[in-house]
Image: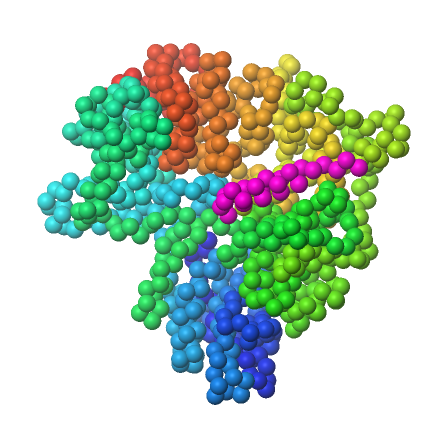
Amino acid sequence: MRTDAEHCSFVLLADFDIDRGAQLTYQFPQPLGTDEGLLANLMLPDGAERQPEDWTIFFLNQTPLNTIAPVLALDTPGVRTSRIEEDEDGNPELLYVLNLVRTKLDKTVRRGAIVKAMAICTRHSFIEIFKPVLLMALDDYFSDPSQDCLARLFDAVNSMDISHAPRLSRYEKLIMRTSERKDLFIEKYENLMRPRVPEQTQSRGNVHRNSDSIGSHSSFEEGIMMRAREDKGKGKENGTAKGPGSSTTSLQQPGQPSPSEGEFSLDGSAVWVESGVDQSPHLPSSMGNAHPGTGNHNTASSGRGRKSTDASSTSSIRARREDAATPAPNVAPPLLKDTHFFPAVIDYNDHQLPIRLPIYTFPEEVGDYSLIQLIQTFSSPSTSILGPQHPHLHTSGNQTHPVMVLFNALVTEKRIIFLGHHRPAGQVSSYVLSACALGSGCGIALRGFIRRAFPYANLTNREEWESIPGYIAGVTNPIFESSGSWDLLCDIETGRMVVSKDIHTNCPPSAIGVAPVQLVMRSGTLKAEGSVGSEDDFVRPSKELNPVQKAELLGKVETTDNLFMDDILSAISLHYGESHVRARFTEYASRFVRLAARYEEEVLGLDTAIGFPTAAYSEGLGGEPKLGSGLCFSDEAVGARELAANASRIEAWRRTQSYELWKHDFNKLRENSPIQGVDVSHQLWRLRHAKRMPDNEVELIMRTLAETVQAYDPVTELLSLLPPHHQGLLPLSFGLFHQQEAIRDLTVVILNEFRTYPVGVQFLQSLNHFQRYSYVRQAHALESRIHREQNTLMIPATYMARTPSNRSESSLTGS
């Protein structure tokens, strides 16, 4: 998200004249310097007169024909500039255009209707936020058709203040995308939500304190304590704390009973245990801790009749209700209902329009697209795939799912058209934007799709977009179906897909360079992780197989893609949300990239530059043990067959611009990654799925994580790979129950580092009661042992150095 640039670069107005056709009437604040006829026809799509209202989206600065060249140089001080800037690849920065076209019936005009369109050109990809103000502006223009309407819209949009909007890192965005918590990273909204305390309130000594929180009935109402681990030896003197969003409020509040060892407050981090003792409602709801043995009973219980042990206890609920009835004057208004969005306001014509800016999006995500809609359209019983089969597209033969055909066409840069005859242009545009998100893994894995996307295209700019290799275009005119200048046509009205009859001529199948049987025979670098004898369950090709047996074996197409699509369709039928589906396709695209890296090593014999090198865990005979890296398979034979099934589309992807962009992005990510020298995804896969894992490997994984994850950025990177739909911290929590004490201690060290930050506290709260109790008990025991056996514990020296030597056992419970 860019907060230093203008929100609106241009405002355009187009009219339809019965004699002259589409005309660009106004360009504010200056002419764009591009073809006005082209812009007018994009703003007034075919069939616009049949729709009372329609939204369309198109981009500028994609090609030489639609690159803007402003006539005036507005570089004077105090005047906003519309000069062209470049992205990190040296290309002109894209301008996203949101266009609203409206038809009003009027019998006094020759055609019986008035058709006008107004558009906003912006550098923000979340263009959907401008729809309310654009609706009002076009209404005003119909009432008073003058350039002043455009000027008011331009000024109103650019006056929107998002200077306090959080700017999340890549890994913070990944965490937020997969979480449904509405208070995630709320500490980043500190400036926005800090309460204003009236002087008279301060003088009276109101019971509500002015703190970094927003009060007892704020977004903390789910019981998240924004606490950082404090230096116990120095915290009472200087009150300092480390980490983003850390609080300097002391753990024990005046007049409150001290926490006991049985409850173990974890420095106020709200990691709860179920001790079987009734909880007290006396602790302030901003703390959320419940102390046993105080004689007060908690009437809240879970669905199974247990006493509530999380932060949403009776005491918290009661305090919130009381505060809601008598709001304190120092509590900020509840502006922030969901931290996934930044609340802003556009002041247009004395109307305060509330705006919700998504702060977790990536540049390849444009508008309010829907992967669920795309999948359902091309997964209906009436969906059919016509035309010849092609190895780049049909990775599972004639059983390839239509959505997988579309994904393959996207990553291999085939020319794709979405046809919506008699459909609104805005609906066609949404399918194009959804397809870009599908192929790019929602902009997280790959990129370059938006650059070759034309959400709405017509005959006027046909020469322009058809000249782009691998274009993705949305059209409403059926004439494009008969033109034959496409490789895959997707009809959104019927759900059918058509592969061009000339696909083999236009896109020759890749020459793999290694015979398929050799590809399958090549031994993997990693050992099989299946159960004993699992490799014998698969017939492996060998030189003794006759040609008929080889053909029969290779004809058994890997169905991983179809199993994945079955899982996605099942999730949709069970009403899983859009965020879940997006996360699954992000993982799918990321795994495709890791599979391609493995393919380059296994088949081509290259030192891959698009992924971690494939290596197994090594005991390090005569040297240091070394962790593994690269993509893992549950079974070596299954992995070899999957490489064979994906060989064609991987070879095709390696010749695309998307491949080159990913190579650049991966090297940049690896260089700037907070966790250096470790393939964390590989280690987590081993913890989740490995069936025969040496204790030494488990210890090395935990020790490596404990040594590297000792700051906020490494914590967020690790947590981004532990999403809730994969059981969150479950892979790490296995270490709490390991037979070796050293591994248990290292696991506690890692979880203690999570506890230092609010986001880590929220992940810890997702542990089940058994895991929480085990962690709390072992964390208390470890802290006690640090005090007694500081020089003999098998935990990282860096962790010991950060632990005060005078830390006492009583400091753990706050007593």
Main secondary structure of the magenta stretch: helix
Q: Is residue 534 or residue 150 the one in the foreground?
A: 534
Q: Is residue 29 magenta?
A: no
Pinpoint residue 763: horizontal percent, then vertical percent: 42, 33
Q: Is residue 36 left or right of residue 762?
A: right
Measuring from the top left, give residue 248's x and y in whole percent.
27, 35
Which residue is depicted at the point 73% across and 23% down? 537
Q: How many marks?
A: 0
| Residue shown at the point (34%, 11%) measured from the top left | 788
Indicate the quadrant where residue 664 lies.
Answer: top right
Residue at 54% over, 45% down: 572
Q: In the image, 732: left or right of 542? A: left
> Which span of residues is magenta-colored?
555-579
> Furthest-left residue in view?
204
In terms of image quadrants, where is residue 792?
Answer: top left
Q: Is residue 571 magenta?
A: yes
**Colour scheme:** rainbow
The C terminus lies in quadrant: top left
558 or 70, nearer to the observer: 558
Rendered location of residue 315, percent (x, y): 24, 34
The residue positioned farthest toward the front in the image shown: 381
Is residue 59 shown to the viewer in this render?
A: no
Residue nearer the viewer, 276 or 120: 276
Vertical placement of residue 544 versus 346, above or below:
above
Residue 273 seen in the current view: yes
Q: Is 257 positioned to the left or the right of 636 in the image?
A: left
Residue at the location (16% across, 51% down)? Answer: 198
Query: Where residue 216 appears, x then y in whole percent?
Result: 24, 41
